[in-house]
């Protein structure tokens, strides 16, 4: 009886281990989906993921007369309000990117390339005459990278650090934006 019980317990342990290995981990490929973009305009698709803290990140595109633009859009978790200051982001160990610089470059061209309110911030992530993200392009890093870290001041005076896995972002971003990867 003891030998049978031990085999049963070993079998249960193995099933538990296999089940744990097959379950999606927080922030992994299973977290990137194609969903409707958060807009009141005509509906369109966006790649979407949610951080463990409940912050939502969308990546979407729009056609322009000169090609394509891809935007990143960030919504904080419930109960969190941004402090009207643009975020800084970093992919893996790359240099940080100050999105306020992107916003300012857009303003110089009389274009909306960045904005922030209490409940949303967005910025131009990438633009091109053709819909192909090449090595060295910011969008290419988002598609090929492992982790995105966004730092943004919030209304209570602190800085919120949001972490998003980029594992699995490739398929969702390509499907939602129509951009291919070189």
Image (spheres, rainbow, N blue to C red):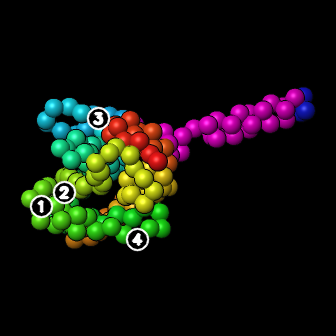
Residue at 28% x, 43% y: name it: 60
Which of the two labelled residues, at mark 4 and mark 2, occupies the earlier sequence position? 4
Please tell me whether mark 1 or mark 3 is closer to you in this view: 1
The label on residue 45 is: 3
Q: Is residue 122 magenta?
A: no
Place of residue 66 in the rendered image (x, y in percent of width and height, measured from the top left): 21, 47
Disc 1 to disc 3, C-alpha distance: 27 Å
Residue position for label 4: 95
Give the mark toward the camera: 4 or 1. 1
Q: Residue furthest left?
A: 110
Q: Main secondary structure of the magenta part?
A: helix
**Residue 165 is at least partly visible in this image:** no
Q: Label 4: state its secondary structure.
A: loop
Callout 4–callout 1 Cβ contact below 8 Å: no
Q: Quadrant of residue 12?
A: top right
Q: Which residues are magenta?
A: 4-33
Q: Which mark is residue 109?
A: 1
Residue at point 85% right, 35% down? 6
User: Which residue is located at x 30 percent, y 54 percent?
Assistant: 126
Disc 2 target residue:
113
Q: Are marks 1 and 2 in contact (CB under 8 Å)?
A: yes
Q: Is residue 18 in the magenta section?
A: yes
Towards the viewer: 2 or 63: 63
Count neighbours of disc 3 (C-alpha within 10 A) and say few if under 14, some if 14 to 19, many if 20 or more.
many
């Amino acid at each position: 009886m003891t030998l049978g019980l031990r085999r049963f317990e070993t079998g249960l342990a193995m099933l538990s281990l296999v089940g744990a290995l097959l379950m999606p981990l927080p922030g992994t490929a299973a977290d990137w989906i194609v969903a409707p973009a958060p807009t009141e305009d005509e509906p369109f698709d966006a790649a979407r993921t949610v951080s463990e803290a409940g912050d939502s990140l969308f990546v979407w595109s729009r056609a322009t007369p000169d090609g394509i633009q891809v935007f990143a859009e960030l919504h904080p978790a419930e109960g969190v309000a941004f402090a009207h200051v643009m975020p800084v982001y970093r992919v893996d160990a790359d240099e940080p990117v100050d999105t306020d610089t992107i916003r300012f470059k857009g303003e110089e061209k009389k274009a909306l390339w960045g904005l922030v309110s209490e409940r949303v911030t967005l910025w131009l992530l990438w633009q091109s005459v053709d819909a192909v993200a090449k090595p060295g392009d910011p969008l290419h890093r988002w598609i090929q990278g492992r982790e995105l870290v966004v730092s943004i001041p919030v209304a209570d005076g602190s800085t919120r650090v949001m972490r998003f896995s980029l594992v699995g972002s490739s398929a969702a971003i390509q499907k939602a934006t129509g951009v291919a990867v070189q």
